Image (spheres, helix red, strand yellow):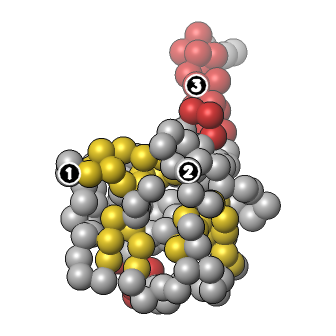
Amino acid sequence: MFSLKKLVIGPIVLAVLLAGCSSSAATSNAPGGNGSPAAGGSTVMVKNLGGANGLVAASNNMTLYTFDSDVANNGKSACTGGCATTWPPLTVPSGTTPTAGAGASGALKTITRDDGSMQVTYNGMPLHFYKGDTAPGDTNGHYPGWNIAKP
């Protein structure tokens, strides 16, 4: 015979397991990020970051960066291998069109990375997170050769 406890806990456990298996419109490998889309399904939006406007991922409000070694509109990112571990790309599932949120008026497109993932570009420049950013609004990745993505 089933106990009341099993009848109550069972559906809760099932809901948690199913929620963990669902997919999202925007994904990331960014620390502090959950990879889930923001309200409205936007991929990127503009926020004030350290006194200036910059792009953030709508999925987790984490700062986005561009790499000086990337060439706009060439369809590739120069950041691969270990670089991509430190600077994870902002990706969306194949077949998904990235969308702009508040303040982001540039062209959003995707490029196919060597691993087959779809990296989001803004005005032709591939977008990356920085693994040293652990909370929304962090700008620890503003290094020589790396810039906060500008709207």
Crowd tier of the residue under label 3, counting other residues whose Cα lies within 10 Å: few below 14, some 14–19, many 20 or above:
few
Disc nearer the start of the sequence (2/1): 1
Q: Amino acid at mark 3?
A: Ile
Secondary structure of residue under mark 2: loop
Q: Is residue 142 above or below residue 33?
A: below
Residue underneath mark 2: 105
On the image, the x and y values in percent for residue 108 come to 62, 60
Q: Is residue 85 visible?
A: no
Asked if labels 1 and 3 touch by Cβ distance under 8 angstroms, the answer is no
In the picture, the disc for residue 50 is 1
x, y percentage for residue 129? 40, 65
Q: Secondary structure at mark 3?
A: helix
Say which of 109 and 140 sits in front. Answer: 109
Identity of the amino acid at label 1?
Gly
Residue 26 visible, this orientation: yes
* C-alpha gap between disc 3 and disc 1: 41 Å
Q: Which mark is residue 12?
A: 3
Q: Earlier in the sequence, mark 3 or mark 2?
A: 3
At a point 25% along the width and 60% down the height, the residue shown is 139
- Where residue 26 sits in the image (x, y, percent)? 60, 53
Q: For this rendering, which residue is in front, 14 or 62?
A: 62
The numbered mark, 3 or 1, whose residue comes first in the sequence reads: 3
The amino acid marked with disc number 2 is Ser
- Work out which quarter of the rendered image holds the C terminus and state it: bottom left
